[in-house]
Image (cartoon, rainbow, N blue to C red):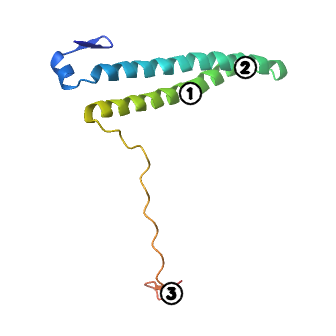
Amino acid sequence: MVNIGVRRVEDALVAKHPGLETYAACQSGAFMKGTGTFILGAAGLIAVQKVIQRKLPYPLQWSLLISIVASSVGSYAVTRWESQKCSDLWLLLETGKIPDRSPPELPKPEESKGPVKTKYGDVID
């Protein structure tokens, strides 16, 4: 059996998806990186704002608010980025193919073939 968090996964499911344990470990790492980013980001921003408060005094509550909001955004970005890499790993383990994350090509606009007449009789070049 494989443990995913506090849940145990049945052997039949693990046999069907051999990359499950690797994926679970990857996701766990992604969440830990996000948590670490939040903690270190908040501590770092508070320290930077302590230095800034010597020149431009403002209340501590604003310092905490700015630090928590900014580190939350950073933590979300890191967790999302790392989770996307785990999803790609899962697809690679399941299908054997690397997923294509490139943006789709937009169709090229057609070139004009001369003047066009509108339903009102106007001519558009």
- The amino acid beneath tag 1 is Gly
Residue 118: image x %, image y %?
Answer: 45, 83
- Point 33% across, 21% down: residue: 22
* Residue occupying the far left of the picture: 12
Whichever of callouts 1 and 2 sits on the residue coming sooner in the sequence is 2
Q: Nearer the viewer, mark 3 or mark 1?
A: 1
Q: Compared with residue 115, is residue 37 higher up or lower down, i.e. above or below?
A: above
- Point 17% across, 16% down: residue: 11
Q: Nearer the viewer, residue 44 or 22?
A: 22
Residue 7: image x %, image y %?
Answer: 27, 13
Whichever of callouts 3 and 1 sits on the residue coming sooner in the sequence is 1
Crowding near the residue tagged with mark 3, few <14, some 14–19, many ≥20 C-alpha atoms within 10 Å: few
Crowding near the residue tagged with mark 1, few <14, some 14–19, many ≥20 C-alpha atoms within 10 Å: some
Q: Is residue 39 left or right of residue 97?
A: right
Number of numbered markers: 3
Secondary element under disc 1, as helix, strand or loop, is helix
- Point 25% across, 13% down: residue: 2
Residue under label 1, please give it.
Answer: 74
Residue under label 2, please give it.
Answer: 48
Q: What number is the disc on residue 122? A: 3
The reply to whether dot 1 and dot 2 touch (C-beta < 8 Å) is no
Give the quadrant of the C terminus: bottom right
Label 3, label 2: how far apart the Cα atoms are: 64 Å
Among the 4 quarters of the image, the one containing residue 62: top right
Label 3, label 1: how far apart the Cα atoms are: 54 Å
The reply to whether dot 3 and dot 1 touch (C-beta < 8 Å) is no
Among the 4 quarters of the image, the one containing residue 52: top right
